[in-house]
Amino acid sequence: MTASVSGLSVGTANAGKLQAVRRALAQYPLLARLEVLPQKVESGVSYQPSTLEETTRGASNRARAAAARGGTVLGIGMESGLFDVGDDKTFDVCACVIYDGTASHVGYSCAWELPPKIRRLVKESGMNLTDAFNEAGICDDPKIGDKGGVLAVVTGGRVTRPDYTVQAIQMAVVAMNPSLYQCSPALPRGINDPLPQFESTPRFRALVLIRTTRVILSGVAVAYFAWLAWFADRPREPAWVI
């Protein structure tokens, strides 16, 4: 990583989103070393974005504002929002934008369908998802969004809000590949290279053999000294005197 790309400004102070950023970066050796710098910035969109375009725009605004405020080359923004499919289905999705000073790299999480009751409360009463889920009695936690999110409620904890935020970040990182996409010259090549398969290297096999040998020898030594202790302590027959 070049010296000019040593930090990543994140357009949020939300603990769950910051956790997701660190989890995602840990999977990329060239990004894992970046210092994560939270920046409290505005999205510039409605509190509950209602289209994919608005959701993406909010993430982009956060990414650019975070980079400017943090004084870093890279800025990342995440925004959750809704979009309709047909006349009767609404989905929730997380958008991520990573701004590299030149280009914006966009990724999305899995999208999940709102229950009809929740959809009506959002559409007719203008509620956000947290308020709608509490109003519907599906959960009873006004701060659920700062925890696993309502996604954790409907999946029984199998997929959480940080989980799908990680997905969005990973999909944005896909485009941080100068050989395939437009990228800033500051970005190094190889961000998306496969992780090294340590188990296939001679050094790794040698280390495994050494460790296995040590374990076996330690076991033999323990057994030997236990036998000696037993032999020394066992009662002996009196010697015959002739």
Image (cartoon, helix red, strand yellow):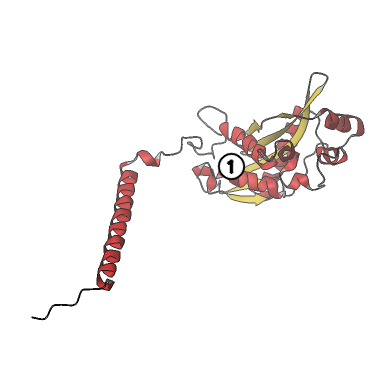
Which residue occupies the extreme right position in the image?
125
Q: Hey, which quadrant is residue 106 in on the image?
A: top right
Residue 195 shows in the view? yes
Does 83 sit above or below residue 59?
A: above
The vertical placement of 191 against 228, above or below, is above
Residue 205 picture location, percent across and down = 32, 44
Query: Type of residue at label 1?
Result: Ala
Position of residue 84 measured from the top left corner of the image (x, y, whole percent) = 79, 24
Which residue is nearer to you in this view: 80 or 42? 80
Left or right position of 105 against 191: right
The residue indicated by pointer 1 is 24
Q: Is residue 45 left or right of residue 26?
A: right
70, above or below 232, in the image: above
Question: What secondary structure is found at the residue carrying circle 1?
Answer: helix
Query: Which residue shows up at 64% across the image and 48% down it?
Result: 19
Name the residue rendered at 51%, 37% in the picture. 191
- In which quarter of the view is residue 166 placed? top right
Residue plotted at (22% across, 73% down): 236
For image coordinates 33% across by 55% down, the residue present is: 215
Vertical comparison of 217 with 126: above or below:
below
Which residue is at the far bottom? 241
Q: Nearer the viewer, residue 196 or 236?
A: 236
